[in-house]
Amino acid sequence: MKSFILILLGIIVALLVVGGAVAYSFMNELGVNMENIDSNDIENLKDKVSSVASSESSDSSSSSQSADSDIVSEEVKFNGQNGEGYYREVTYKDGGFRQYDTESGDLIGSSYKSDQENLPSME
């Protein structure tokens, strides 16, 4: 019984080590390098997010399309497709989402048909 527990613990430790190595490799591949992030970068990102949020509240076109009470979550995510920068993703009760550039506040992605004409051209 004791050897079974030791073997089980060994397997768990091995899985954690392999999983950590894979996660580290994946994060480096995406360009997320925690060594180069300092407190100024984090503060700058917070300032950008808050300025986008305040400019968004004054934007009548997007606030008229969906009430604030319909928002389920808001997340700031790394723009892996572009390879740099961040975007804010807002998810609504109906399952739809909108994505906004954190620097400009522009709508860059949406699951709503009514927003498709407002999105930037992919050409």
Image: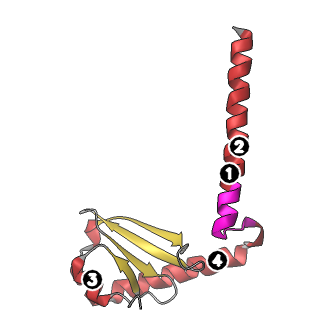
Label 3 and label 1: CA atoms lie apart by 38 Å
Local SS, label 4: helix
Sequence-first tag of 2 and 4:
2
Q: Is residue 15 above or below residue 38?
A: above
Q: Which residues are magenta?
A: 24-34
Local SS, label 1: helix
Kind of residue indicated by mark 3: Asp
Label 2 and label 1: CA atoms lie apart by 6 Å
Residue 49 in percent (x, y) is at: 51, 79
Q: Nearer the viewer, mark 2 or mark 4?
A: 2
Picture residue at 46% right of the left edge, 75% below the top: 88
Q: Nearer the viewer, mark 3 or mark 1?
A: 1
Q: Nearer the viewer, mark 1 or mark 4?
A: 1
In the rendered image, which residue does mark 3 sit on?
115
Kind of residue indicated by mark 1: Val
Kind of residue indicated by mark 2: Val
Picture residue at 42% right of the left edge, 71% below the top: 89
Residue 116 in percent (x, y) is at: 28, 83
Sequence-first tag of 3 and 1:
1
Residue 43 in percent (x, y) is at: 64, 77
Q: Please tell me in which quadrant of the rendered image residue 9 appears.
A: top right
Q: Are the residues flagged by discs 1 and 4 in contact, CB closer than 8 Å?
A: no
Kind of residue indicated by mark 4: Glu
Label 2 and label 3: CA atoms lie apart by 43 Å
